[in-house]
Image (spheres, coloured by chain):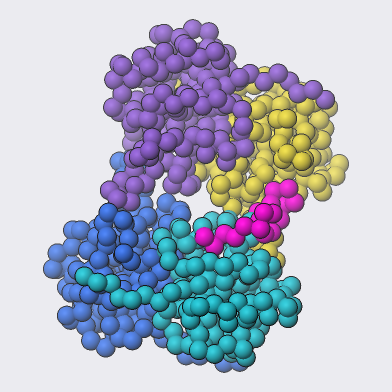
Chain colours: A cyan, B blue, C yellow, D purple
Amino acid sequence: MTLPDFPDVRILVTGGTIDKVHDPRIEAIVFARDGATQIPDILAMGRCHHPVIQKVLLKDSLEFDDADRTAISDAVLAAPETALVITHGTGTMGETARWLADRVQGKTVVLTGAMRPHSLSASDGSFNLGGAVVAAQTLPPGIYGVMNGRVLPAAHLDKNVAAGRFDI
Amino acid sequence: MTLPDFPDVRILVTGGTIDKVHDPRIEAIVFARDGATQIPDILAMGRCHHPVIQKVLLKDSLEFDDADRTAISDAVLAAPETALVITHGTGTMGETARWLADRVQGKTVVLTGAMRPHSLSASDGSFNLGGAVVAAQTLPPGIYGVMNGRVLPAAHLDKNVAAGRFDI
Amino acid sequence: MTLPDFPDVRILVTGGTIDKVHDPRIEAIVFARDGATQIPDILAMGRCHHPVIQKVLLKDSLEFDDADRTAISDAVLAAPETALVITHGTGTMGETARWLADRVQGKTVVLTGAMRPHSLSASDGSFNLGGAVVAAQTLPPGIYGVMNGRVLPAAHLDKNVAAGRFDI
Amino acid sequence: MTLPDFPDVRILVTGGTIDKVHDPRIEAIVFARDGATQIPDILAMGRCHHPVIQKVLLKDSLEFDDADRTAISDAVLAAPETALVITHGTGTMGETARWLADRVQGKTVVLTGAMRPHSLSASDGSFNLGGAVVAAQTLPPGIYGVMNGRVLPAAHLDKNVAAGRFDI
């Protein structure tokens, strides 16, 4: 039996909680000192072997400025793939989605992240990334977020800070 | 801002590795003695609050017979939702998908499972279920599997036993 | 066969990293908002059923003042048991040990803690607490710390901050 | 400040549940196919840097015969250290302890293990090994088990199979 043609998927890493680790020296949740991303570990745990991973940034999205968002949109535009996932902080995921909606045509771009770092165990990162990788392959061109098991178009992608959720 | 209308999703639990636990008394990976399913725990970890969960079976799919598959297809047909996820053992996921393809029309049904039980940590169950919940909402009617970050139509849903994968 | 008489053990909880949790709302490692301690969870994981657990404080030990240390030494003195474990932040574990050495006679008191919170998984808390519970039952009266698989008398109990260790 | 002289500790690995892993191909809890032991990982998690680790066997202790126990007692006798920990299956831990009690003089030997494999997370292995490493340094010469936060002399070391405990 021949498998169907699968679309190529590229994951652009930009940081966010999903990618943070515990630093015992300063008792804080920060990015790894060596600049390593945790996304390959999530994919390995999910036995998901196919995406290309490209680290664009490793920052808290609350600190993103226009230069950061330009780096992200440039990476989306430069990618040979039309199916993209962006791992991103939850704080300004919606802003980046709407930035991309103004600049990207003809590609399916899915932003995702986590409320609890993958490295702490019992994280929502794996569930969310699993959803985003599928959404990037199944949705029509456009900019979306995948959080809480829901697909949110860019215009509706905003964190309910009090609830820590995007789906209400 | 008004959120988009989200489709209702029902998860039918049938067992499989994703739902097994370690039993120290017999040193084995089995279903919980009290018949409890782990799927609510995966959803809670993924901060996914919306699916209705219905336990149909709690069995190893290698032991499924026609009566079991009838129970599954009956549950799909009886469900008021048109978006369904079925958690299932990997051993005969393809057989059940094709059983459903012969009996179900007009619904999007996504089978998923795991190679490592959720309860053991570092499981692929969360990644897979996250993908399946999204796929059930985004794919056109039909029967599919979601494993390894890929969407496989029923006709192509088969485990490569040697590799422990569905995508090759 | 009759089991040997086991000494009674009391665990005094004072806080420290071992007892912290991740708070997604503020992206920080803090004590649980409801004031709950994680020590019962560590004991349950270790299948250790016997110690009495008494919460004295739930604070970062860098913030301890004399009133806090008085509360700890009062609890040690008031305890009916002669075998005590104190879960404690690593920052000033040595200061508290020496405070107790000046005030407590005839009891075996073992301080312990962790560099990584138990709730984050892959923590040293379980290993350390397992050692402390045994040390409290096997050491002669005195004040000790147990960290890194070593028993350190109060006079030698100091964290090497750069290395994050007590045994060098 | 000069640290106290610490005793050298050797850990003899013999297998048992503590050292097993999940094998997705056969859906079972077995020893790693490459013969690797998980004990270094437990020590690393516990930030315990000092013990020498020697793999003697990697077997289920229910399958031990006299040749296996001879290999263990020979390793104890040959070790330059007088403080030894033996990681061991829970099934016949007592038999090995009493075998050693007949053959070893002048050394402190502490057997330990786990009811749930370390590799599955939420295991008692870390708590038990932390206790055993301390007990080997603090107890007088003799053969003991450390399980459930208790020190059990060889004559009293027996698993209550129904309860999955050694301390009742």
Residue closer to the observer: C103 or B122: B122
Residue closer to the observer: C45 or D13: D13
Residue B67, x across and y down, in percent = 14, 68
Magenta part mainly helix, strand or loop? loop
Q: Farthest right residue?
A: C66
Identify the residue at image location x=37%, y=17%: D71
- Which portion, as a residue range, is magenta? A22-40
The answer to which image quadrant residue A15 occupies is: bottom right
Residue D65, x across and y down, in percent = 29, 20
Residue C1 appears in the figure? no
In the figure, is residue A109 to the left or right of B111?
right
Identify the residue at image location x=46%, y=54%: B122
Q: Is residue D44 above or below residue B160?
A: above
Residue A21 appears in the figure? yes
How many numbered marks are there? 0
Where, quadrant-wise, is the C terminus of chain D in this rendering? Answer: top left
Residue C37, x across and y down, in percent = 63, 50
Where, quadrant-wise, is the N terminus of chain D in this rendering? Answer: top right
Q: Is residue A159 above or below residue C59?
A: below
In the figure, is residue A140 to the left or right of A72?
left
Identify the residue at image location x=33%, y=51%: D24
The answer to which image quadrant residue B42 occupies is: bottom left
In the image, is residue A59 part of the stretch drawn in magenta?
no
Residue B117, x across and y down, in percent = 37, 55
Identify the residue at image location x=57%, y=92%: B2
In the figure, is residue C116 to the left or right of D72?
right
